[in-house]
Image (cartoon, rainbow, N blue to C red):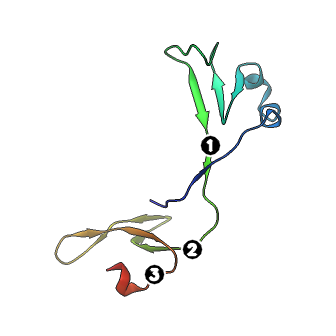
């Protein structure tokens, strides 16, 4: 639910970091790894893998903590609340 992710630019150096079993199968294609014979002529079964990242930032989260996860918070009116906002938002602004 956090917004602002950006594409990760891949380089030939990133291909060299792949495990040996994948190096011979993968090709670099722009911002993606391509698993298949020819990225210009994709066929069923070929795969294109891209990566995005989210820079560290402040987020305000309204949810219920349950173990290691966050879930929607049930209210007395049986309406569930789960919200993520960019920045440091006050409780009044979240409700």
Q: CA distance from mark 1 to mark 2?
A: 22 Å
Q: Which residue is mark 2?
A: 58
Q: Secondary structure at mark 1?
A: loop
Res 55 quadrant in image: bottom right
Picture disc at residue 85: none
Tell me what residue is drawn at x 24 percent, y 76 percent.
75
Which quadrant, please, contains the C terminus?
bottom left
Pointer 3 or 2: first along the chain: 2
Instruction: Please state the horizontal and vertical placement of residue 79, each as a whole percent of the image.
Output: 21, 70
Which quadrant, please, contains the N terminus?
bottom left
Instruction: Please state the horizontal and vertical placement of residue 94, each as a whole percent of the image.
Output: 36, 79
Q: Which residue is mark 1?
A: 51
Pointer 1 or 2: first along the chain: 1
Q: Secondary structure at mark 2?
A: loop
Q: Is residue 64 left or right of residue 9?
A: left
Q: Is residue 12 left or right of residue 42?
A: right
């Amino acid at each position: 639910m956090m917004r602002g992710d950006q594409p990760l630019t891949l380089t030939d150096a990133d291909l060299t970091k792949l495990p040996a079993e994948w190096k011979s199968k993968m090709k670099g294609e722009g911002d993606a790894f391509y698993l298949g014979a020819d990225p210009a002529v994709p066929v069923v079964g070929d795969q294109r893998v891209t990566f995005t990242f989210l820079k560290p930032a402040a987020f305000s989260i309204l949810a219920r903590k349950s173990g290691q996860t966050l879930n929607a918070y049930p209210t007395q009116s049986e309406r569930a609340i789960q919200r993520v906002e960019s920045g440091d938002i006050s409780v009044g602004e979240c409700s």
